Image (cartoon, rainbow, N blue to C red):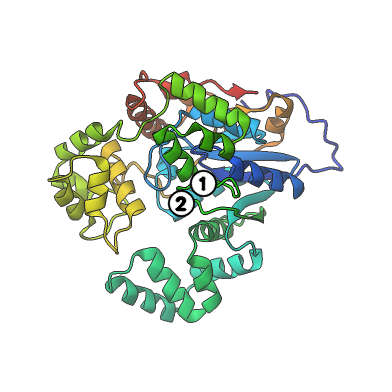
Amino acid sequence: MQNTFPDSHFSKAHFPQIAGVIAEYNPFHNGHLHHLQQTRQAGADFIVVVMSTCFTQRGEMAVLPVKERVQMALEGGADAVFALPVAWSLRDAEHFALGGVSLLNGLGCSMLSFGCETPRADLLSQTASLLEFPPESMLDDLHTFLAEGLPYPAALARAAGRFDPACSSVLSSPNNTLAVCYLRQLMRLGSSMVPLCIPRESDYLETRLDASTFASASGIRAALARGDWPAISGAMPETGVRLLREASLNGRILKPGALDHAVLCMLRTLSPEFWKQLPDQSEGLPDRVRNALKTAVCLEDLLDKACTRRYTRPRVARLVMHAFLQFDRSVLPSDGPSQALLLGVRRESEELLHLLGPMKIIGNASQLSDSWRQSEEKAWDLWSVGCGLPMGGLYSHRIVRV
């Protein structure tokens, strides 16, 4: 798709500010709208979003098809949306950040905009530097806390806190932790992107919908499951509510439990040898999931039984989804994407595509490299079973234009 767009109207004297955002929009809500608006007010001429496709970072499946989520983002203020493939979206925070930051850096974004509980770039950068270049004493403490059974995020926060108390408070919040991962990736890439910290206005795990505050995506999904459309209408932009209603009426919503039988069937057929090849695991975790699988009757039951103080729910859920998709360590990359798959663009912003690069931009999934294409194809096809949709969604997707 390179070199096929008209020249930009921007003069050489004006270098447009292109802000990059890493998102899931599962679904897009008023908090996301606020984030994009704040990013624009901070000086962004264009906003480029890198969005998870069918599976999310916490080991969950997207509630809506990619098309609707892309349209929500474009209607909400994004100028272009690119795919964050499952090979990076369904990973721990470090690899999730690796995929998103690598894409935005390769697309030439000048700013990286993200939400966080501590909107202080200096403190976040201080924490990122400590984690990127940890002293030996901190690593010793980390190993000690892990041996005591603490989950890795909690052990890391405690170890960092012993060396620098301010860093402990930063790492105690999930979005701060992800923000720190973004900053670490900027360091590793030697990127010139400027961090833009936007304060979060809600708890992203809060399931209640309160009209006085921004709702979370978790709360909206819970309301969707119980059919509470009045609550949803107050939590999302009008266009988003319309798209969500249309998807629900057309059977394009992934309802809770829709893929439970498929997941359990797949997991029960896997050999013990395959479980040992799954990525991002530690000793004992695969065995714990396999033991829970013997009596679990649904996915929630499996996660409830497998989770412990040490093995958090997102970590177990990611392992389960990797097993479901049959993604072993050989499938998942250790570096960032080399291509950018365009999912959608605003018509009035198509000149933006001429400004992006040097990463190759493609508009058709058939042009993807083999390893990425095969894993992404499987993710789209298995996800679509839960909505009764046909195979081939990755290839039938057309660039969304609004």
Quadrant occupied by the C terminus: top right
Q: Which mark is residue 205?
A: 2
Q: Residues within 10 Å of mark 1 (few under 14, many from 20)?
A: many
Quadrant occupied by the N terminus: top right
Q: Residue at x 23, y 46 (%)?
A: 301
x and y percentages locating residue 378 in the rendered image:
34, 30
x and y percentages locating residue 379 in the rendered image:
36, 32
Query: Circles 1 and 2: CB distance less than 8 Å?
Result: yes
Q: Quarter-wise, where is residue 50 in the image?
A: top right
Q: What is the number of callouts on the image?
A: 2
Q: Which mark is residue 43?
A: none
The disc, 1 or 2, on the residue closer to the chain's N-terminal end is 2
Q: Is residue 158 above or below residue 32?
A: below
List the residue tagged with mark 1: 216
x and y percentages locating residue 321 in the rendered image:
31, 42
Q: Is residue 7 above or below residue 296?
A: above
The answer to whether one can see residue 342 in this image is no
Tag 1: residue type?
Ser
Tag 2: residue type?
Leu
